[in-house]
Image: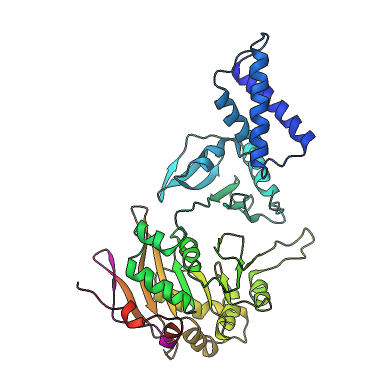
């Protein structure tokens, strides 16, 4: 019997022990590891008495069995690698990862059955499904990673799998200063803006770090506030004690029971929120968020946009998707009155994430154009103070901040 066969035999024993004990391999990590350690140790001791080959490295055997039984098989090595930010499968023989914002093709080769089995295992804990009637799925894995799957005939031939790992590199705005995402002055101002209750929009492209920035901004919310979050799937990690988190729900096989993001935003207003945070606005839910913000409930959200000004424009057009009775005459002044600060963050060519600009929305509009004022802009690759000022100076004063001191320009 080869070492490979020995590991397979131990794996079979472990699976039987799992069935008997009722352990959930995806959640009971400590119990699962101990079970595998005991099984490998027992086999190793029996092999000393002859009849069974000696394991070359029991530690390797433990890692191999855990990756197959409790992890994600050939992909587990990328989940365990802290440098890997994202994993995606274009076809079974082409598995990619991203490290430091740069994509690379891995040597991992799967079969079509391997891909389907991995997706089934990943979806098990979420209760979501993917099939011909629902060819797309978004789900959150137990470790916080986000899974997105598309199957044929929406995709051409193979299952398309994306896993965006939950990699904690920053919890507070000071962490982003340390990483070079923004300057200390900008971070201090944003912390004051959040504490003062200003409405903030975080804009950027895919993988720019919008959710991370939103999490860091949330850390500046006063601890007494009650926060209600609305997301497509759970991604936000708000470090406060009073947080009510909601995510959307897929329709059932009969096509009923779907809970879209727009419904969550409406329900959030009934939950006594001090703050509302929406993971990302893409469609008509932007109207309900604007109405919530305009009703006096402070909030934050993210949106895909290539600049702060484009983000403001997008917030003026997305609500029009809510119905023919929604017009620009209502939306534009509502955006001007509801959005206070827009932050644009981008993924640079070297893989780093940087805030490129922070603008204020003073509340004035001329026709369909909303006025914005530059607070911080990028000059020569560095985020520097501009000449603008944010609205609601009195909110900063009530929260105990000196706005002029926060935005005082140092020597250039």
**In this image, 74 relative to 124: left or right?**
left
User: Residue 64 colored magenta?
Assistant: no
**Rendering colour mode:** rainbow
Q: Above or below — where is 27 with respect to 252? A: above
Residue stretch in magenta: 378-394
Q: Which residue occupies 62% across, 76% down?
A: 273
Q: Quadrant of the C terminus?
A: bottom left
| Whole-percent x, y for residue 138 in the image | 62, 56
Note whether 157 is above or below 213 in the view shown: above
User: Residue 270: x percent and y percent?
Assistant: 69, 78
Q: Quadrant of the N terminus?
A: top right
Percent x, y of residue 48: 64, 11
Q: Camera-side residue: 290 or 113? A: 290
In terms of image quadrants, where is residue 121?
Answer: top right
Residue 393 is covered by the magenta coloring: yes
Q: Nearer the viewer, residue 371 or 238?
A: 238
Q: Position of residue 147 (x, y in %)?
A: 59, 52
Q: Nearer the viewer, residue 60 or 249?
A: 60
The image quarter containing residue 43 is: top right
Residue 12, compared with residue 125, is above or below; it is above
> Can residue 54 be seen in the rendering of this structure?
yes
> Residue at the left extreme?
412
- Residue 284 in sight: no
Q: How many numbered discs? A: 0
Residue 376 in which image quadrant: bottom left
- Is 146 left, or right, of 127 in this rendering? left
Q: Is residue 412 left or right of residue 48?
A: left
Q: Which one is nearer the viewer's eye here, 377 or 218?
A: 218
Q: Residue at x 28, y 81 (%)?
A: 387
């Amino acid at each position: 019997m080869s070492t490979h066969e020995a590991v397979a035999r131990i794996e079979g024993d472990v699976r039987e022990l799992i069935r008997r004990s009722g352990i959930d391999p995806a959640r009971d990590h400590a119990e699962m590891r101990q079970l595998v350690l005991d099984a490998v140790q027992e086999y190793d001791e029996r092999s000393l008495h002859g009849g069974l080959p000696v394991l070359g490295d029991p530690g390797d055997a433990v890692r191999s069995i855990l990756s197959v039984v409790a992890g994600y098989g050939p992909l587990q090595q990328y989940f365990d690698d802290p440098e890997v930010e994202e994993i995606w499968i274009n076809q079974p023989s082409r598995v990619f990862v991203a490290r430091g914002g740069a994509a690379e093709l891995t040597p991992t080769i799967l079969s079509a059955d391997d891909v389907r089995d991995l997706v089934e295992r990943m979806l098990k804990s979420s209760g979501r499904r993917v099939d011909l009637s629902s060819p797309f799925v978004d789900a959150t894995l137990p470790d916080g990673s986000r899974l997105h799957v598309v199957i044929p005939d929406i995709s051409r031939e193979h299952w398309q799998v994306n896993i965006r790992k939950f990699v904690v590199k920053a919890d507070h705005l000071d962490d982003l200063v340390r990483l070079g995402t923004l300057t200390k002055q900008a971070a201090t101002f944003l912390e004051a803006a959040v504490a003062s209750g200003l409405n903030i929009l975080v804009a950027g492209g895919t993988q720019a770090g919008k959710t991370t920035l939103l999490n860091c901004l949330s850390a500046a919310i006063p601890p007494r506030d009650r926060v209600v979050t609305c997301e497509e799937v759970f991604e936000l990690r708000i470090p406060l004690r009073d947080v009510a988190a909601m995510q959307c729900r897929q329709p059932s096989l009969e096509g009923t029971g779907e809970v879209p993001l727009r419904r969550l935003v409406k329900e959030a207003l009934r939950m006594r929120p001090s703050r509302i945070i929406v993971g990302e606005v893409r469609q008509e839910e932007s109207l309900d968020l604007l109405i919530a913000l305009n009703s006096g409930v402070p909030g934050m959200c993210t949106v895909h946009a290539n600049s702060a000004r484009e983000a403001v424009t997008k917030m003026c057009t997305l609500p029009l998707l809510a119905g023919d009775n929604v017009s620009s005459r209502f939306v534009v002044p509502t955006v001007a009155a509801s959005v206070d600060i827009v932050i644009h963050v981008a993924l640079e060519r070297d893989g780093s994430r940087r805030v490129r600009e922070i603008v204020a929305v003073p509340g004035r509009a001329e026709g369909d154009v909303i006025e914005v004022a530059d607070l911080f802009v990028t000059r020569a690759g560095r985020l520097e103070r501009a000449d603008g000022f944010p609205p609601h100076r009195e909110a900063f004063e009530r929260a105990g901040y000196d706005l002029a001191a926060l935005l005082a320009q140092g020597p250039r």
